[in-house]
Amino acid sequence: MTEKKKNITIRNTIITVAILSITTIISYFFSAGTNRAFNTTIFYILAVMFIARYTDGYVPGVIASFLSVLLVNFAFTYPYMKLNFSISGYPLTFAAMMIISSLTSTTTTHLKDQAKVITQQEKMLMETEKEKMRANLLRAISHDLRTPLTSIIGNSSTYLDNPDTLSEKDKRSLVQNIYDDSNWLLHMVENLLSVTRIREKDAHVSKTLEPLEEVISEAVTRLKKRLPDAKINVKIPDDFIMIPMDATLIEQVLINLLENGIYHANSTLPLDLEVTIDNGYARFSVTDYGVGIKKELLNTIFDGYTSTPSSSGDSRKGMGIGLSICKTIITAHDGKIWAENHENGARFTFILPLGEQVYDTEIECDSN
């Protein structure tokens, strides 16, 4: 017998003895107080169920069933403190109790095993989802890092190889391109650092109550430091609202969505950032008034490998990594995120639960 099996056997024995002992004590006082000793069989059937629930395998439950029958016969059937199977009708009672106890034990053990299988399947699905997220992020990184790096190298090489033939205007243009691409790379690094804040153990984040107004204000302020000309209309509830979240990560999501609208909407109209409270959720929406999203991309836009340059020809800034990270962050907050088109552009929406318990209310995710 291995050490593990030995420990399991000892544990099963202790649990079985303890539960049967407690049941016998309870049955004694019940019998003494009511003079209905025969009803103690119910206590032993419940005991068998608990033993099956808290032990490993079928054996403890079957043994407990047999011992329960003997204890009822020995302690609570006349003549007391003696085994007597010759009482009229008792063999049938003995068999019935043994069958009921055994079935109870077997059913409970089976349900427990099924619960273990379901738990294992859920863990496997979670691990699969985490691996999918990692793969999507790697695909996005391989694309979104390569393009600006190539541009930086090319512009630097041009500047260094032609210092005397380039005009001041051309030099400034090359340096500006290097500056823009470097800022874009810095933004992607910030995104990746945000993802590292998500705990690897269970793909969830540590949430604290944060004031909605401060989170929105900080996100817009951080974006305008990078894009001073960004035009954003903000609309939030007048009430003071606290939402459980990791504020830094949610700010990063808002920045990614706003920046995505600025770069890819191909519009000079302001973006709308609106927050509403709906059925136990905070709903965040970023709406642009531009070209919209191609219908075939709506279901895969958060997968991490979407590379759709804006129609202005700026091929440096794909949507992949930013939106993939948004999905990773929102999923880690037990929320949902989706994209949809409206009459005059695109809208990105995500929801966060207002409490620790996620409500069962279905949120409609329209992707027309």
Image (cartoon, rainbow, N blue to C red):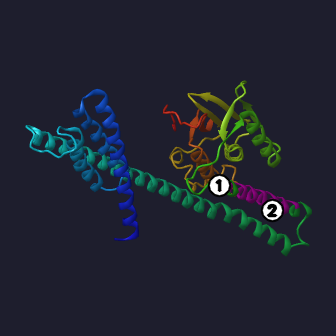
Q: Front-most of 340 and 345?
A: 340
Q: Is residue 186 magenta?
A: yes
Q: Which residue is disc 1 drawn over? A: 195
**Magenta extent:** 172-191
Q: Front-most of 70 and 305?
A: 70
Is residue 169 positioned above or below 205 on the image?
below
- Label annotation for residue 89: none
Q: State which quarter of the image contains the N terminus.
A: bottom left
Q: Front-most of 332 and 167?
A: 332
Label 1, secondary structure: give it. Answer: helix
Q: Residue drawn 12% across and 45% down?
A: 85
Quarter of the rendering containing residue 217: top right
Specify the amino acid type for callout 2. Answer: Ile
Q: Is residue 89 left or right of residue 308?
A: left
**Residue 167 spot, x, y in % from top left:** 90, 65
How many numbered marks have been drawn onto this rendered protein structure? 2
- Mark 1 Cα-neighbour bin, 10 Å: few <14, some 14–19, many ≥20: many
Specify the amino acid type for callout 1. Answer: Val
Q: Is residue 281 magenta?
A: no
Q: Main secondary structure of the magenta part?
A: helix
Of the numbered discs 1 and 2, the one sitting upstream in the chain is 2
Label 2, secondary structure: give it. Answer: helix
**Residue 36 spot, x, y in % from top left:** 24, 29
Residue 170 visible within the image? yes
Q: Is residue 281 left or right of residue 146?
A: left
Q: Which residue is disc 2 drawn over? A: 178
Q: Is residue 94 left or right of residue 367?
A: left
Is residue 36 positioned above or below 126 on the image?
above
| Inter-mark Cα distance, 1 to 2 | 26 Å
Residue 287 visible within the image? no
**Residue 230 spot, x, y in % from top left:** 78, 41
